[in-house]
Amino acid sequence: MKKLLTLIAMIAFCLSTNAQMILSEQHAMLRVNAQHRYLLLPVQEKEENANIHVIVGNKDCQSFNIRLAVDKVDYFVPLDIARFGAKDVLLDITFHGDRRATGAIKGFTCWKEMKQSDTFDTTNREQYRPGYHHTPPYAWMNDPNGMVYNDGVWHLFYQWNPYGSQWENMTWGHSTSRDLIHWEAQPTAIEPDFIGAIFSGSAVVDKDNTAGFGAGAIVAMYTSAGQAQTQSIAYSNDGGKTFKKYDGNPVITYEAPDFRDPKVFWYEATKRWIVVLAVGQEVQFYSSPDLKHWTYESSFGHEYGNHDGVWECPDLVCLNAGSKCFTAIKEQAGREPQKAIFSDDAAYGNKWVLLLNINPGGPFGGSATQYFVGQFDGHKFVCEDEPSETKWMDYGKDHYATVTFSNAPQNRTVALAWMSNWQYAGVVPTQQFRSANSIPRDLQLLQLDGETYLVSTPSEEMLNMRGKAYKKGTGAGNKVFKNLLKQNDGVYELTAGLNMLKGDQISITLYNNKGEQVVIGFDSAKKEYFFDRTKSGLTAFSNDFASVTRAPLPDVGRYQLRIFVDKSSVEVFIDPGFNKSGLFPMTSLVFPTEPYNNLRVETKGKARVEDITVYELKY
């Protein structure tokens, strides 16, 4: 991740005390003579939020919440005061904490620690910041938003709090990439306004100027979260660099407290835009000719899937890429042939997949992504699965808010997820930033034993990251491999072939010299595999973190395994012999105090682990 702002020279000074005006036990004002671009605000995470109104020329220009430091500074965040174009900026500050516990506000640390500077240093200071996963330059991030491909550039917008590493002040941050791996931070895309905070949404390229904002405009649709949740749009005529909000916002309203996360796409058969919205524990479909005027079409969800939490961040995709219908038949001793047909061909028939995120209600607690397979005709979605059936996109604890890129090239369907869980996202052991995204995954369908499943294959761009390969051996029995890489900083990919008969077991353990470890186990008798992070490193920050997650293991006997390790995460993908890895993947955060630099392989029965290879990754 490149820095948003490079530290060239630090010019800073403490604010003079006579600029500070204490008005009551919980209210103060601060007059700032704006001599530099940024006012650096000191944050203390354990404190309650204070509310700041930025007043210029007697006008309220911005409002946000921040945990201003009372007696200790955890980190600083920048307030861009140069943007207001005035030499005199007044901050109206209301504290909400208990003064009996924190003391008089005139003695708060924040007053003497606030500084001005022309730059803000985003150089990584975190042990657990990933090497090749997308992260924000600083502060809090959750759901990916507005993901769109345009003119050779992948645009990733995301839920961002510019003023701290806890959820607050929802804004669209923005990063861009030309290879889905290396991301460059861009200026803030869409900021809160009077209608509300900027919650999750999507973006499309309006090639035919249906909205009247210009041919090729990027149009973003998002939830305005204020007194109610309504849907608004904004548009960009400079390739996504800047956005202007539509004067007619909001464009969709509804009488429901949870009405959010619009995903927009063009439906060619009816020549209309379709948006799918999460509404409590169902989704609603609307259509529009111009992205401004919307007609309700139908709803889906009652009695289908998991309803243990609120439904969020829906997406609806048609998976029909490719030109050849491929049939794979795997015959193993003592088994009936397993047949798999990939829906890569119109001759097989297109199917639609409704991605639906839920919190709580995940298979192992907290948040997760479920999906439904069926048909969509531009008006309603009909699910082919049984109402009581729940299909999970990922069986780890840290794969949520999954959505796909609009306008992706070559008819690809590329997905990203927020790599965390609402059970502990705000307390993981980082502060300069919080949260990363999963690696990019191309989505396809697989029919296995009469069921249709979603396959999440690591995107082909991940292969370009591979550097030197280290072969680690093959065979049955128990083996230990020390020092996986010569330069192991906790960033690598591991691949292996697994061969198992009925009743066989395999375990693969990644561990460090302190005994911290993760165990990935395969059990052919139980037809499952598991990921155990109970001894993975730092876990005490949340009672919900140390866990064992489990996923189905198709009974095919041979599997290809890919494991992506990146400082604070492990993503596991298996290919059950069909040349498409990513059936029942697992995504998990880990916080080892030193990298997992050793490997232990154990087998039971006649199981064999073959062609173990560890790749250095270039990032």
Image (spheres, rainbow, N blue to C red):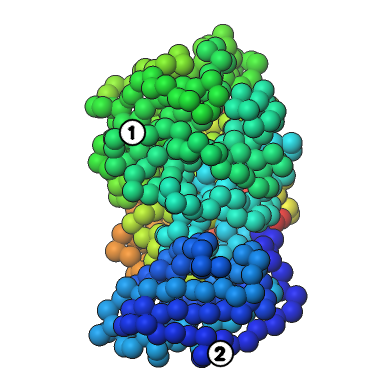
Q: Position of residue 429 (x, y in %)?
A: 44, 69
- Quarter that holds the N terminus: bottom right
Q: Residue at x 24, y 27 (%)?
A: 303
**CA–CA distance in space, label 1 to label 2:** 49 Å
In-image side of 7 versus 74 (left or right): right
Mark 2: secondary structure = loop
- Residue furthest to the front: 58
Would you identify the image quadrant in which residue 420 lies?
bottom left
| Residue type indicated by callout 1 | Tyr
Q: Residue at x 33, y 82 (%)?
A: 24
Q: Position of residue 516 (x, y in %)?
A: 44, 68
Nearer to us in this view, 131 or 154: 154
Nearer to us in this view, 446 or 615: 446
Q: Position of residue 228 (x, y in %)?
A: 34, 44
> How many numbered markers are drawn?
2
Q: Position of residue 471 (x, y in %)?
A: 66, 52
What residue sits right under mark 2 in the picture? 16
Res. 57 in view: yes
| Residue type indicated by callout 2 | Ser
Res. 389 in view: no
Q: Give the number of the disc on residue 375.
A: none
- Quarter that holds the C terminus: bottom right
Above or below 184: residue 23: below
In-image side of 503 versus 343 (left or right): left
Nearer to us in this view, 220 or 565: 220
Q: Give the number of the disc on residue 254.
A: 1
In-image side of 457 versus 253 (left or right): right
- Residue furthest to the top: 347
Mark 1: secondary structure = loop
